[in-house]
Image (cartoon, rainbow, N blue to C red):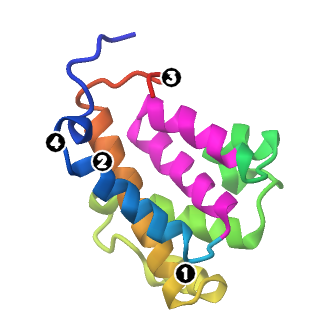
Amino acid sequence: MRTERMPNPAMLVPEAMPALMALNSAITATGVDGRVLALSHLRASQINGCGPCVAGGAQQARRHGATDDQVHAVAAWRDTPWFSDEERAALALTEAVTRLADQADPVPDQVWDVAATYFDQKELAALLLNIAMTNAFNRLNAPTRQQAGNW
């Protein structure tokens, strides 16, 4: 385990964490299923190797009704039977948005179109904001080596 380099940057800038939390509140207020948002958060955090967000995402997913099978297998969601079509659409979008630099067409029409069959524009906006926020937290936590359990 690596040593934490510094406190979370959002904790050191006085208005940053309340602003981030306000955006999270706005996302949850849209009515998108909390389990979908939590599974999306967990998957992006796994991709980015963010220990605190993976640990927190697993807890959040369970609080919102995700099964242990789902939490344990979210990294292999394509190859397991435990996810609904809606959850699969959200996870595919999460992976594409989190890995923007990995493809010439970062979010292919096929991924977008499937997601758009399950989520209306407001829900897609909430899901995209959730993915962006997760990636922001991952990019604050990973370089500063934040530790899981220190929240």
Mark 2 or mark 1: name the one nearer the start of the chain. 2
Residue 85 placement (x, y as % from top left): 74, 72
**Residue matched to label 3:** 149
State the CA–CA distance, disc 2 to disc 1.
24 Å
> Mark 1: which secondary structure?
helix
Residue 36 placement (x, y as % from top left): 65, 62
Mark whose residue sits in front, 2 or 1: 2
State the CA–CA distance, disc 3 to disc 1.
30 Å
Residue 7 placement (x, y as % from top left): 25, 25
Mark 4 or mark 1: name the one nearer the start of the chain. 4
The disc labelled 3 sits on which kind of residue?
Gly
**Magenta-tinted stretch:** 33-61
Q: Is residue 96 visible?
A: no
The stretch drawn in magenta includes residue 34: yes
**Residue matched to label 2:** 17
State the CA–CA distance, disc 4 to disc 2.
8 Å
**Residue matched to label 4:** 13
The reply to whether dot 3 and dot 1 touch (C-beta < 8 Å) is no
> Mark 2: which secondary structure?
helix
State the CA–CA distance, disc 3 to disc 4.
21 Å
Residue at 44% over, 79% down? 125
The stretch drawn in magenta includes residue 52: yes
The disc labelled 2 sits on which kind of residue?
Met
Q: Which mark is residue 123?
A: 1
Mark whose residue sits in front, 3 or 4: 4
The disc labelled 4 sits on which kind of residue?
Val
Q: Quadrant of the N terminus?
A: top left
The disc labelled 1 sits on which kind of residue?
Glu
